[in-house]
């Protein structure tokens, strides 16, 4: 067994309401969750404070994005400092929906990582390939390009506060799931890349989690793979079955 603490994140994306969040947190708060699994839930900006006030205290709250400045004339943006001020401990950075729908670059994503960590947030850094990139056999080149931008700007000690979430874009919200073997193969390659690009220590200690149509039925097999250190969960994190995923290693 790895010494890395298993990590399960929820990403609510642009979903939720006050009533729905109260109902869901009641379910989560009364559910069984192992003490040796770290759980983080990402909520839309407007619900971060509500979630931090109502969610069980052994779980943490994340923002789903942030900007690269602490404050200023950036209408509509949210700073890492603001997220922290309303109770977030984590932030999701580089999600494929930010990269591919909103056009955020590798370098911009890397800058967000730097600013979030400097503000005292931990980072869930998302990487992953499009379907055409997998079919062209360039998954690893894509993932290394995305990671490389971050490697250039982080100090080695920063990686202690980063979880890498491998999310093949073709599997997000599609019902298609990378097989446990595909996930393990890419996770192992990411770990090997971190070994040479950063250090063997960072490679051994950094948690690499899988995201892409994870649910209560398919999580247990993937959780057994040596380089799968958890999950970043989309749709299923809005349902009681999220507790099944939190318990995937049990």
Image (tube, grey):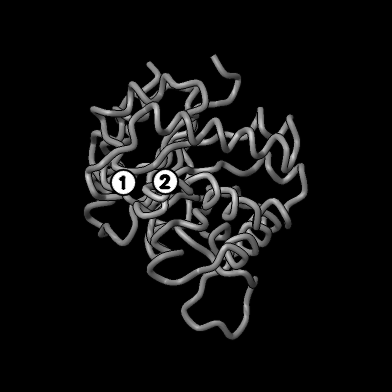
Residue shown at 40%/24% (left/top)?
Answer: 223
* 132 sits to left or right of 143: left
Q: How many marks?
A: 2
Residue shown at 56%/35% (left/top)?
Answer: 189
Picture coordinates of residue 84, whole percent (x, y): 57, 57
Picture coordinates of residue 196, whole percent (x, y): 73, 38
Which of these two is toward me, 9 or 16? 9
Q: Is label 1 in a helix, a strand or a loop? A: helix
Residue shown at 51%/59% (left/top)?
Answer: 86
Check disc 1 and report the residue beneath it.
171
Residue 58 at least partly seen:
no
Asked whether the residues under the numbered discs 1 and 2 touch, taking CB atoms below 8 Å apart as contact, a structural biologist would say: yes
* Residue 178 image-quadrant placement: top left
Q: CA distance from mark 1 to mark 2?
A: 7 Å
In this rendering, the answer to whether 39 lies above or below 41 is: above
Picture coordinates of residue 180, whole percent (x, y): 37, 27
In this rendering, the answer to whether 61 lies above or below 83 is: above
Tell me the quadrant of the picture where the N terminus can be found. top right
Picture coordinates of residue 241, whole percent (x, y): 24, 33
Which of these two is toward me, 110 or 33? 110
Check disc 2 and report the residue beneath it.
167
Q: Is label 2 in a helix, a strand or a loop? A: loop
* Residue 14 image-quadrant placement: bottom left
């Amino acid at each position: 067994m790895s010494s890395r603490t298993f990590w399960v994140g929820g990403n609510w994306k642009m979903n939720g309401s006050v009533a729905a969040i109260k109902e869901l947190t009641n379910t989560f708060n009364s559910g069984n969750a192992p003490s040796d699994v770290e759980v983080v839930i990402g909520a839309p900006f407007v619900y971060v404070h509500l979630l931090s006030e109502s969610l069980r205290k052994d779980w943490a709250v994340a923002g789903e994005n942030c900007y690269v400045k602490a404050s200023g004339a950036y209408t509509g943006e949210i700073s890492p400092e603001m997220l922290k001020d309303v109770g977030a401990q984590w932030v999701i950075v580089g999600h494929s929906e930010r990269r591919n729908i909103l056009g955020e670059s590798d370098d911009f994503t890397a800058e967000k990582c730097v600013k979030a960590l400097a503000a005292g947030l931990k980072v869930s850094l998302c990487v992953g390939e499009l379907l055409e990139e997998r079919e062209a056999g360039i998954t690893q080149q894509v993932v290394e390009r995305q990671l490389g931008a971050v490697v250039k700007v982080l100090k080695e000690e920063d990686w202690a506060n980063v979880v890498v979430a491998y999310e093949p874009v073709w599997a997000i919200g599609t019902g298609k799931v990378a097989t446990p073997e595909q996930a393990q193969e890419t996770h192992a390659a990411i770990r090997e890349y971190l070994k040479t690009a950063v250090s063997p220590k960072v490679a051994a200690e950094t948690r690499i989690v899988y995201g892409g149509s994870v649910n209560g039925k398919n999580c247990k097999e993937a959780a057994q793979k040596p380089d799968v250190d958890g999950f970043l969960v989309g749709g299923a994190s809005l349902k009681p079955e999220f507790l099944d995923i939190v318990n995937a290693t049990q």
